[in-house]
Amino acid sequence: MRLSAYFEDLSKAYLAELEDLQSDSEGKNVLAARLNQKRAQFKELMPMIGFAPEMVAPVFHNAVTVLNAQALLMLAFAEPEEFPSWQELAPAVQMAPWAEKFVAMALQEPEGERFMLTVICLEFLHAKELSQSAVTRATGANDDTGGEADGEGERPDGDDGDDEQDLDEAGADWMSEQGFDRRG
């Protein structure tokens, strides 16, 4: 189970953007002030939602309450062309009341649905500290080498079974441990 390339790259960029907003040159925490500044400039930032969503997404930082983590996790594995509609996924989250006006503004834009789906997934990934390495650690996969040096694709028990099936099973185990129901 891997994050899509889209979210793997964007989650790193989003984290970097939040870190940049976190402190000033003197090391003081100025995140709240900078987030308020971005929110005040939201309309001017809208042209960036298609090519740099991670620069605009902080407007929604701490505005997303996840109601259906499994739906967001599935979104994290999807590429943009595979995204569901906003209307389908909106029930999986609850937006803070102060953010509703920004959601409405974003959804009026041609790329607004994709942007809002990106935002809720980035906030989900950030809040759960779920990155590609965390998913890899949780499932026991080795994402650095593509295989073990002393027996590529070999499992600890010596059986060189189907890696894809092993990964899927490990992912299902991990999801079950997190409190999600196993799929059919």
Image (cartoon, grey):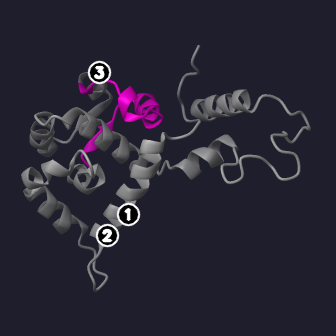
Asked where in the image residue 94 lies, by quadrant, the reply is top left
Q: Which residue is mark 1?
A: 16
- Residue 114 in which image quadrant: top left
Q: Which residue is disc 3 drawn over? A: 88
Q: Is residue 66 magenta?
A: yes
Q: Position of residue 133 (x, y in %)?
A: 58, 52
First to last magenta residue range: 62-86
Do residues under tags 1 and 2 come within 8 Å of each other at their CB atoms?
A: yes
Q: Tag count in the figure?
A: 3
Q: Nearer the viewer, residue 120 or 154?
A: 154
Label of residue 46 in the image:
none
Q: Is residue 131 magenta?
A: no
Q: Which residue is painted at 38% across and 57% down in the image? A: 13
Q: Secondary structure at mark 1?
A: helix
Tag 2: residue type? Asp
Residue 20 bears which disc, if any?
A: 2
Label 3: few (<14), some or many (≥20) within 10 Å?
A: few
Picture coordinates of residue 156, whole percent (x, y): 86, 42
For image coordinates 19% across by 36% down, the residue present is 112
Q: Is residue 142 left or right of residue 36?
A: right
Give the CA distance from mark 1 to mark 3. 29 Å
- Residue type highlighted by circle 3: Glu
Compute the Cα span from label 1 to label 2. 6 Å
Q: Residues within 10 Å of mark 2 (few under 14, many from 20)?
A: few
Q: Is residue 92 above or below residue 137?
A: above
Q: Earlier in the sequence, mark 2 or mark 3?
A: 2
